[in-house]
Image: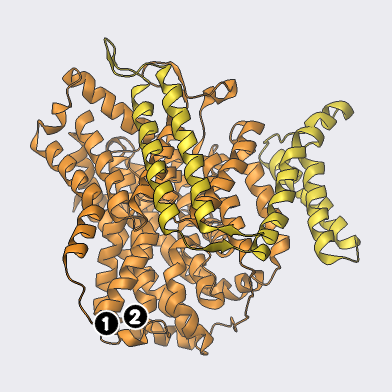
Chain colours: A yellow, B orange
Amino acid sequence: MMVSGRSLEAATALITGAFGAAVVVSSLDNGIGWSAAGVESGTFPFIVGLVIAAGSLFNLVQGWLHARAVILGPSELRRLGKLFVPAAVYVGVIPLIGIYPASAFYVFGTLAWHRRGSLLLPALAAIGAALALYLIFELTFQISLPRGALGTIIGF
Amino acid sequence: MENLEALMHGFGIALSGNHIFLMLIGVLLGILVGVLPGLGAPNGVSLLLPLTFGMQPVSAIILLSSMYWGALFGGSVTSILFNIPGEPSSVATTFDGYPMARDGRPTTALATAFGSAAFGALAGVVLITLSASWVAQVALAFGPPEYFAVYFLAFASFVGMGGSPPIKTLVSLAIGFALAAVGIDTVSGSVRLTMGIDELVKGISFVVAVMGLFGIGELLIAVEDEFHVKAISSKVEWREVFRTLAGLPRYSWALLRSAAIGCWMGITPGGPTAASFMSYGIAKRLSPRHANFGKGEPEGIIAPETADHAAGTSALLPMLSLGIPGSATAAVMMGGLMIWGLNPGPMLFVEQKDFVWGLIASMYLGNVVAVVLVLLTVPIFAALMRVPFFIIAPVIVIICTVGAYSVSNSYLDVMLMMGFGVLGYLFKKLHYPLAPLVLAIVIGDKAEDAFRQSMLMSRGSLGIFFAKPLVTTLILLGAALLLMPLIWRTISRMMPRSPSTP
C-alpha cells in the first residue's frame, strides 16, 4: 500500500476544512455582527472559521496540483502503524483498566514484541514503568491518575 | 543606568542557592528533552508546568527558562553527532555540523556550536536588558486598538516571514484561534464552539495541544524514517574546546550578523527555526567560502546556531514587555505566567520587578550553566541516543498521556491529545507550521478581547484602527507583511530569470 502526497494533502485540507465549516456553523448559534452589547460572541469564531475553510480550499487545490508523487511507502506505513496502533490501544483501554495496568501492558507488549525471547526483562520494565508513574505523580506531586472501571471494581 | 541597577538587583535574586539548583535541574532536563526525539522544549516546559504551581513565580520561571536553554543546546548535540536534529530549530546545524564531526572533528564542531550559541544567547539577553523596560514603558500607554494592532502585526509576521507556505500558516493560525475560542466567552459569558460536548465548556488547554502536536506528532515523524545511529566518538577533548573558542572571534562578522537576524526573528515572532534557516541561507550566499558549505564549514555551524539561540532568547522580550510570545516555547511559558496569576505585559515591569529582573539575570547565568553542563554531559546524552527507539517511544507516549491528563484530570483531554498527535504528524509532513497554532491558542482570547474592546470604543467602526498614527502604522506594517509572499512572487515572476544563479 502506498500513500501519495496528493491524497495526504487532500485529506489534511479536508480535515481542516471540515473543522472550519463546523466552527462557522457553530458560531452562528452565538450570533454574529453588532448588537447593543458590542461585537457578538460568535463574530470572531465566524470570521476565523471562514478563513480556515477558505484556506483549506486553497490548500486542497494547491496540494492537488503541486504535490510530490509518493511520500509514504509500504515500509514507512508499517512503521507508523507499529507505533500508532499500540499507542491508540493504550489510550483506548485506560478508562477500562486504569492507567497503571495499561502502561504496564503497553511497555511489556512493545518490549516483548521487539525482543522476542526472554520475557523477564520486559516484565521487569513493565512493573518498573507502572511503579515509577505511581511514585512520581501520585506520591510526589499528588496528581491522581485515572484508575478506570477496573479500579472502581477492586476498590483501588 | 536604571536598568543596570535593576539588573544587579535581579542578580541578587537569581544567585541564591535554591535558584542555582533549579537552574541546574532545568538545564539538565532541558538537554534531556532536547536530545530525545519526540520530546522538545515546548513539551518539556508544558510537562513541568503542573509541578511549578506550588513555587514562587520567579523560581518557577527560572526552572522553565533554564529548561528552554538546555533544550536549545541539547538539540544541537544530536544534530552534530548523529545527524538527527533533536529540535526543529537545530535542523540547519546538521548541514555543516555533522560533516565536520564525521570527518573526525566532533569536538571542534560541538565547541563551535556551543560558543556561537552562547554568543547568540548573550546578544538576546543584552537586548532584553537594554530595551525591555523601555518597550514596556511605551506599551503602558497602549489601549485596546494598539494592542490589537500589535497582535495583528505579530500574526502577520508569521505569515509573511515564517518561511512556510503562507496559506498553510494562515490555516494553522486560524485553527489556533478557533480552539482558543472554545468554551466560555470571557466577554459575554456565553458558551461557544463546544459542538455538543458539554465537557468542552472548560475550553481546550494549550498543554493538551502541545503534547499532541509536538509529542505524538514528532514521534510519528521520527519513527517513519528508520534511524541508523552512526556512532561518532563523543569524547570531548578540552584543549580543543578552548582552542576553538579562542578562534571564534575570527568569525565576528558572521557572529554579529547571525545574532542580528536571530534577535529580529525572535522579537517579531518568526521563531528560532525560521531564524536558523534564514541565517544559514544568508551566510551561504555571502561567505567567500560558500563552496565549502555543507562539507563542514565552521561558518555553516556558526550562522544557524547563533541565530537559533539569539531568537530563542529574544523571544522572551515581547513576551515580557507586551504579552506576545515570540516562539512556541515562549507561548507555553506565558501560559504558565497566567496560571501563576501574573499578567504578562508592561504592568509586569511595574508590579513584578523582582520577577522580571530575576528572570533576566537568570538568563545570563542560565546560559553559562547550560554551556558548561552540556560540554560535561555530551558523552552521557550521546550514549542515551543508542537506546533503541522502540524503548523510548512507549515512554514518550506514556509521558504525553499523563501530561495531557493531569492538566484537568480529564480523559477527554487524552483523546484530544491523540487527535492533535495525528494532526501534528500531518502538518509536519506537509509543511504546515505548528508554532502559530500554539501561539494563537495561548493569546487568541486576548487578541479577540482587544478587538472587541476597540469596537466598543468606536461603536463598531473599524476606523479606530486608522485614527492614530501609531495604530495606523502597525496595522499597515502588518498588512504589508501579510502581502509580502504575494509581492515576492510577483516580483520574481516579472524579473527574467538570470542564466547563472549563484
Q: Secondary structure at mark 2?
A: helix
For the N terminus of chain B, the image quarter is bottom left
Residue that carries the numbered disc 1 in the rendered image: B287
Q: Residue at x 31, y 84 (%)?
A: B290
Residue B227 marker: none
Left or right: residue B60 versus residue B266 is right
The amino acid beneath tag 2 is Glu
Q: Residue at x 43, y 33 (%)?
A: B178
Mark 1 and mark 2, same subunit?
A: yes
Q: Position of residue B442 (x, y in %)?
A: 42, 38
User: From where the camera sits, is residue B107 visible?
Assistant: no
Q: Earlier in the sequence, mark 1 or mark 2?
A: 1
Q: Residues within 10 Å of mark 1 (few under 14, many from 20)?
A: some
Mark 2 and mark 1 in contact (Cβ < 8 Å)? yes
Q: Residue at x 28, y 29 (%)?
A: B450
Q: What is the chain identity of the residue bearing mark 2?
A: B
Residue that carries the numbered disc 2 in the rendered image: B299
Left or right: residue A130 versus residue B48 is right
Query: Hey, which residue is sitting farthest top in the picture?
Result: A36
Residue B277 higher or lower than A9, as above or below: below
Residue A25 higher or lower than B317, as above or below: above
Q: Position of residue B15 (x, y in %)?
A: 43, 56
Query: Hey, which residue is sitting farthest bottom in the picture?
Result: B104
Q: Residue at x 32, y 27 (%)?
A: B449
B394 or B423: nearer the viewer = B423
B370 or A117: nearer the viewer = A117
Left or right: residue B478 versus residue A103 is left
Left or right: residue B55 versus residue A60 is right
The amino acid beneath tag 1 is Ser
Q: CA distance from mark 1 to mark 2?
A: 8 Å
Task: Report the number of discs.
Answer: 2
